[in-house]
Image (tube, helix red, strand yellow):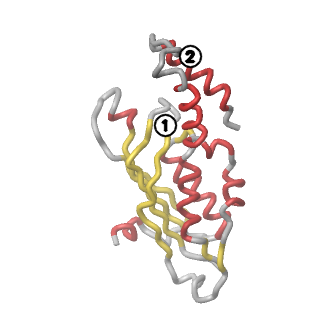
């Protein structure tokens, strides 16, 4: 579980390490505010993928919706995360999820909630896709799932090479969906 008190202490130490006074007027409440922000931004750290699957397991089993010839695509789910290597922001990220139902379909908002929750962890972009894939598989039992994630990484844009670029990753289960479905 994310520990708010430890975060507050850590942020106070960071302010001191940066050479500023944590008791100065503008910074007195900063450790508390920063800890609150981290509680929100790292909420996903509190849950395993299996627990996320239970949280968002809302499916429908209507026959005409779950025919294995149908394809469900949800595109442009906006998320952000933090790189586990530098604690740097991964931003301007979008997640696209496509799957072929196998007896049940998941509520569309649940796909966005899953993407959001797994992004709220110390992450790698590739792992975000794999985590979403695992959870969608667990909930829908689909054998055909394709995840595309596009994003910018401040560990590249704000430090080191300092060049803006977009990273695209794919996670896939089965062979019946190609990346071309996201170009529609």
- Residue at 67% x, 63% y is 138
Q: Is residue 89 above or below residue 47?
A: above
Q: Is residue 73 above or below residue 155?
A: below
Q: Alpha carbon of mark 1 to alpha carbon of mark 2: how far?
A: 21 Å
Camera-side residue: 135 or 79?
Answer: 79
**Is tag 1's residue or tag 2's residue first in the polypeptide sequence?**
2
Q: Please identify the quarter of the rendering in which residue 3 is found.
A: top right
Instruction: Point out the frontmost of discs 1 and 2.
Output: 2
**Label 1 SS:** strand
Q: Position of residue 171 (x, y in %)?
A: 50, 56
- Residue at 58% x, 32% y is 35
Tell me the quarter of the image containing the N terminus.
Answer: top right
Q: Position of residue 147 (x, y in %)?
A: 48, 60
Q: Left or right: where does residue 184 sit relative to residue 119?
A: left
Give the numbered dot on residue 83: 1
Tell me the quarter of the image containing the C terminus.
Answer: bottom left
Does the CB distance between marks 1 and 2 fall below 8 Å?
Answer: no
Direction front: furthest residue: 25
Q: Please identify the quarter of the rendering in which residue 9 is found.
A: top right
Near mark 2 (Cα within 10 A), the count class, few <14, some 14-19 or many ≥20, is some
Camera-side residue: 135 or 114?
Answer: 114
Q: Which residue is mark 2?
A: 13
Q: Is residue 72 above or below residue 109?
A: below
Q: Left or right: where does residue 36 sit relative to residue 21?
A: right
Camera-side residue: 72 or 7?
Answer: 7
Q: Position of residue 137 (x, y in %)?
A: 63, 64
**Label 2 SS:** helix
Q: How many labels, in total? A: 2
Camera-side residue: 9 or 114?
Answer: 9
Give the numbered dot on residue 50: none
């Amino acid at each position: 579980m994310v520990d708010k008190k430890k975060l507050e202490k850590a942020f106070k130490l960071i302010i001191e390490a940066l050479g500023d006074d944590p008791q100065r007027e503008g910074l007195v409440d900063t450790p508390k505010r920063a800890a609150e922000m981290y509680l929100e931004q790292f909420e996903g750290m509190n849950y395993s993928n299996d627990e996320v699957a239970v949280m968002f397991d809302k499916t429908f089993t209507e026959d005409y919706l779950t025919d294995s010839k149908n394809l469900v695509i949800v595109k442009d789910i906006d998320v952000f995360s933090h790189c586990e290597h530098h604690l740097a922001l991964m931003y301007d990220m979008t997640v696209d999820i496509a799957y072929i139902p196998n007896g049940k379909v998941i509520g569309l908002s649940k796909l966005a909630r899953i993407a959001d929750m797994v992004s709220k962890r110390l992450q790698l972009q590739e792992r975000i896709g794999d985590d979403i894939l695992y959870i969608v598989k667990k909930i829908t039992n689909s054998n055909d799932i394709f995840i595309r994630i596009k994003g910018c990484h401040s560990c590249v844009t704000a430090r080191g090479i300092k060049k803006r670029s977009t990273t695209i990753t794919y996670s896939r289960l089965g062979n019946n969906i190609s990346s071309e479905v996201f170009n529609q």
